């Protein structure tokens, strides 16, 4: 029971201040989402990844059939059908290793330019250039707007296995 001698004003003020801080955090989060993922950025366009192949660094070409599993000492690259996208769309592709480090890619550039120059997206390997880290590698094809990635157009995952 509250007695006349108990003063609840400091507690009430603290609760109001915490509520104000919560509203400010909510507004800042909403502003962040709207700044980096504005509404209307989704186009529904999808890129086509032909496959991931063994890559010959000396020849600069892919060989064999598409694969999902590679050995640590095998270089690999994906073939992307950039012609399946509108030629003026700004796109790029990046390989990410199991530590989510970017380990190769192309772009951002117009899809028409990439179709003429970079059909193959090469995974560049680890920093020591001898062996890839074991784990899953992801290729992500992105659409860019004003220099920032705004939409995932395609993705492909492969496994680098120690026993392959």
Image (cartoon, helix red, strand yellow):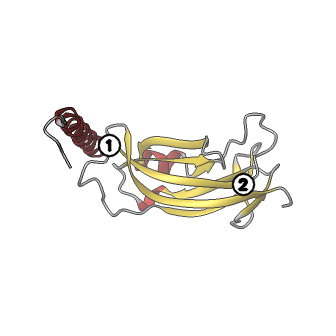
| Element on which disc 1 rests | helix
**Residue 97 against residue 82 in the figure, above or below:** above
Q: Position of residue 26 (x, y in %)?
A: 26, 44
Image quarter for residue 42? bottom left
Nearer to me, 39 or 77: 39
Image point (37%, 40%), residue name: 148
| Element on which disc 2 rests | strand
Which residue is the site of mark 1? Answer: 36
Q: Position of residue 40 (x, y in %)?
A: 23, 55
Image point (26%, 38%), residue name: 18
Which residue is the site of mark 2? Answer: 135
Nearer to me, 61 or 5: 5
Q: Position of residue 49 (x, y in %)?
A: 54, 62
Image point (44%, 45%), residue name: 113
Q: Position of residue 28 (x, y in %)?
A: 26, 38
Side of 28 relative to 96 (left or right): left
Mark pair 1, 2: CA separation = 30 Å
Callout 2 crowding tier (Cα within 10 Å): few <14, some 14–19, many ≥20: some
Side of 15 relative to 160 (left or right): left
Nearer to me, 135 or 71: 135
**Residue 94 against residue 156 in the figure, above or below:** above
């Amino acid at each position: 029971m509250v007695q006349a001698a108990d003063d609840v004003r400091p507690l009430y003020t603290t609760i109001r201040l915490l509520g104000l801080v919560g509203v400010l955090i909510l507004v800042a989060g909403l502003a962040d989402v709207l700044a980096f993922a504005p509404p209307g950025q989704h186009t529904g366009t999808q890129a086509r990844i032909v496959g991931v192949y063994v890559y010959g660094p000396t020849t600069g070409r892919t060989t064999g059939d598409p694969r999902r599993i590679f050995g640590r000492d095998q270089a690999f690259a994906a073939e992307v059908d950039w012609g399946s996208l509108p030629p003026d769309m700004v796109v790029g592709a990046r390989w990410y290793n199991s530590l989510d480090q970017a380990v190769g890619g192309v772009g951002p550039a117009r899809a028409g330019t990439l179709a003429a120059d970079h059909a193959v997206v090469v995974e560049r390997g680890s920093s020591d250039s001898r062996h890839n880290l074991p784990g899953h590698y992801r290729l992500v094809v992105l659409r860019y707007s004003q220099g920032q990635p705004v939409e995932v157009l395609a993705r492909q995952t492969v496994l680098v296995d120690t026993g392959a």
